[in-house]
Image (cartoon, coloured by chain):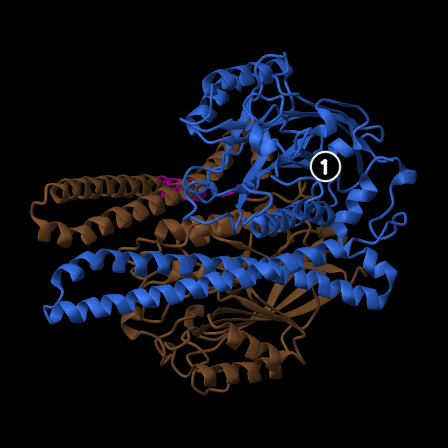
Chain colours: A blue, B brown
Amino acid sequence: MRPNFSLRLRVFNLNCWDIPYLSRRRADRLRRLGDFLNAEGFDLALLEEVWSEQDFHYLRQKLSPIYPAAHYFQSGVIGSGLCVFSKHPVQDFTQHVYTLNGYPYMIHHGDWFCGKAVGLLVLQLSGLVLNAYVTHLHAEYNRQKDIYLTHRVAQAWELAQFIHHTSRKADVVLLCGDLNLHPKDLGCRLLKEWTGLHDAYLETQDFRGSEEGCTMVPENCYVNQRELEPFRLGIRIDYVLYKAVSRFYISCKTLKTTTGHDPHSGSPLSDHEALMATLCVRHSPPQHNPSPTHGPAERPPSISVLREAWTELDLGVARARWWAALAGYTATLGLLLLALLGVLAAGRGAREAVLLLWAPGMGLVLGAGAACLIHMQEAKGLCRARAELQHVLGREREAQDLGPESQAALLPGQQEGRRAKEQ
Amino acid sequence: MRPNFSLRLRVFNLNCWDIPYLSRRRADRLRRLGDFLNAEGFDLALLEEVWSEQDFHYLRQKLSPIYPAAHYFQSGVIGSGLCVFSKHPVQDFTQHVYTLNGYPYMIHHGDWFCGKAVGLLVLQLSGLVLNAYVTHLHAEYNRQKDIYLTHRVAQAWELAQFIHHTSRKADVVLLCGDLNLHPKDLGCRLLKEWTGLHDAYLETQDFRGSEEGCTMVPENCYVNQRELEPFRLGIRIDYVLYKAVSRFYISCKTLKTTTGHDPHSGSPLSDHEALMATLCVRHSPPQHNPSPTHGPAERPPSISVLREAWTELDLGVARARWWAALAGYTATLGLLLLALLGVLAAGRGAREAVLLLWAPGMGLVLGAGAACLIHMQEAKGLCRARAELQHVLGREREAQDLGPESQAALLPGQQEGRRAKEQ
C-alpha cells in the first residue's frame, strides 16, 4: 500500500420508519429515498426499520445500478429491519441476534418479534479491510420508567463484544444505526468505552444539520410531538461511530443531517433524520505509528462505566429472578386450582362453576408458566453479560496490582481506537 | 518470539452427562472427574452437559489450585451446559447462542430450553494467541427420521461463521465439543470445509483408545444400547479440531480416548468417552511460511458441500413456512370456533357445550398461534443461514469467472488452516 494512501468514504444512515400498514406515506418516502441514494452514490447506505422485505426488494432493484451489493438481515419473527446497500463488493456478511430484546407478552411494543440484531459486512477497499456494522437497539418507550433499560445495556455490551471479537483484523471499523440511546446514557458510554469508537458528531471538522446533531426533531411532521416535549431541540439517538484499528488514521471530514425535511426541503424521508458522513482514511505517517503497547500516553480506561453497567445488570438479574419466582408461584396456584376443579368435577359438585373456571385455570397455568420461562431466560442472559463484565473487572484489579502499563493494556479496542484517531 | 518456539498444549474434552435427577451416579462421577483433572493438570479442560451450575461451582472449587481460570456459559432457560477450566489466565470470554435449536413444544427433548451455544475463550500463551471454542449442537434423536437435521446444519454453519469471524487475529484455533454429528454428516463436513479445521483423530501421530475413535461405545454401561444397535463399534460425535492461522504450524502428537471405563479402568465418567489430545505448536520455518495469497497449491474448496448445505436449508425454509401456514390456519379456525361459541352464548343456546368447548377453543388459538410464531422464526433463521451461503456461492461463481487464483482465495479459513498444518 502506498505510504500516501488516502481513502474517502461516504456513508448514509437512516432509520426508515417503514412499518407496513402503520407508517404514513411509506411508498412515497421509499421512492424518494431510492432516488436520493442513487443521485448521491454513497459508498455505503445502512438502513434500519425496513420491516417489509418487499420494500427491501423494491429498493434493491431500484438501487442495483449504483449499489450492486445488498443484504437484508433476517431475524426474529418479522425480520431485524436492517439492510445495507454497497457500491463496492462485499466479502462477507454475518449477524448477531441480541440475546435479550424485550418480552414476547409485550405485543404492543413489538420489539421482541423483530429479533433486534447487529449486522456485519466486511469489505476490502483498495487493500483496506473495512468492517461495517449496522444495528438497532430496543426502543425506549418511557424514559422516566424504562423497563427495558437493562436489556438495552445488555445489548450495548453484546454489541461492543461482537465488534471487539470480530474486528481484530479489520483496518477500519464503522458502526451506524439507531441505538435508542442518548449520548450520555449508560449503554452509549459502555459501547464507546469498550470498543474505542468515536462519535462522528463530536469529532467532525464540519457539521451541518439539526441543532446539537439531533436525529429526532420537533420540526419533523412524522414525529410524535408529545414524546419529544421534554427535549426542546429533539434527541440524538442515531449515530455514525468509527475507528481505525491498525496502521491507519481516520477522521470525519463532514457530517450532515437532514433537519425535519428531506434533503431537498420536501416532506421528511422518515420520522428520524438521516446521517451523511464523509470519512477520510489515511495511512498513518511513520512518526505517528506507535505500536499498540508503546503508544502515546492514554488516559486509563474508564472502569467506572463498566462497574456502572455491572451494577445495572446485577439489579436486572435480581428483578428477572423475582418475576420468574412470582410467575412460578402463580403457575403452581393455577395447578392447585385445576386440581380442585378436578376433585369437584369427580364429585359432580358445582358443575357449572367447574366448566366456567376450567379455561381461566388452564390459562393461568400456561400463561404464568410461559412468563416463568421468559424471565428465567432473561436472568440467564443478564447473568451472561454480568459474568463477562465481571471477568473484565477482575482483570482490571489484577492490572492495577501490576501497575499502570498493564492497566492501559486492558482495553485494546479503546487504546487502538484512540491511537488511530487522526490528531 | 524465538524462531525455534514450540508449545505443547494438553487438552481434555468430555460431555459429562450431568443432568440433575436423571443421570446416574452423578456426584460420584463428578468427584472422580475432578480428581482426574487435578492429577493430570491439562492446559485446558472443556466440558459439555454440565447442566447444574451447582456442579460447576463444585468443580471450580475443587479444581481451582490447578485451574485458576474457570467459566460457565449461561444461556437459555437451563444454561448451555458448557464450561471451561484453564491452567492459564484467560484474556476474554464470550459466547454465541445458536439462532435455531429445536422447538419449545418438544419438551421431552429439552434442547430448546438449554439454549445451545458456542463459548469462546481467548488465551495468550508465550505470546501466542489461542482461541479455544467449546460447543454442543442439537441432539439427534432419530437418525432415520431426523427432524432436527436442518437445525444442526444451520448450527454448524453459525458455528463455522462465528469461528471464521472471531479468529482472524488468533494464531491457533481449537474447537472441542459434542457436535452430535458423525464424521461424514453434512454439518461436520460443512464446518471443516468453511473453517479449515483439522480433525485430531484423523491427523494424530499416535492414537490410543476406542476403535475408530468412537466417543459413544457399547462397552459403556451408561449408554443406551438400543440406540447404538446399528453401530457395532459405536459412534464418533465428540471432536477435537484445530488449526494454526498465521505463522505457526500445529500437529496432534497424541490423542487418547477412554474406552467405556474411566481412565483407571473404573466405572465410566459419563455416557460419552473423554478425549485427551496433546497438540504441538511450532513457529513455522521460513521456507514453510507462505503468505496467505501465495501459499503452495491447495485443492480448490469443496463448493459441493456448501451447495448441499444450501439445498438442505432451502428445504428447511419450505418446511418451516408450511408448518407456520398450517398453524396460522388452525389458529384462525380456533378463532372462528370461539366466535361461534360467543354467538351461542349470547343466544343462551347449548350453554353446557359452550362452557365445555371454551377452554379447548382458547387452547387451540393460543397453541396454534404460538406454533405459527415459532415456525415463522424458524423460517427467518434458516433464511439467514441460506442467504449467507448464497452470498458465498455467488462469490464462488465470480471467482470461477476470474480464474483459479481467486477461487483458491475464496475460503480464507480453509486455506490458512491447510497452509498451517504441519507437513
Q: Magenta residues? A: B299-314
Q: Who's the residue at 67% across and 63% down the image?
A: A390
Chain bearing mark 1: A
The local crowd at label 1, few if under 14, some if 14 to 19, many if 20 or more residues have their Cα within 10 Å, is: many
Residue B14 magenta-drawn? no
Residue B35: % across, % down = 57, 85
- The answer to whether any part of residue B403 appears in the image is no
Magenta stretch: helix, strand or loop mostly: helix
Q: Quadrant of residue A170?
A: top right
For the N terminus of chain B, which image quadrant? bottom right
Q: Relative to residue B375, is residue A280 drawn left or right? A: right
Secondary structure of the residue carrying tag 1 is strand
Q: Residue lying at the far right in this picture: please name it.
A: A287
Asked if residue A383 is positioned above or below residue B211 in the image, the reply reads above
Residue A309: % across, % down = 66, 55
Residue B302 magenta-drawn? yes
Q: Relative to residue B7, is residue B132 drawn left or right? A: left
Tell me the residue that label 1 is attached to.
A242
Q: Residue lying at the far left in this picture: please name it.
A: B350
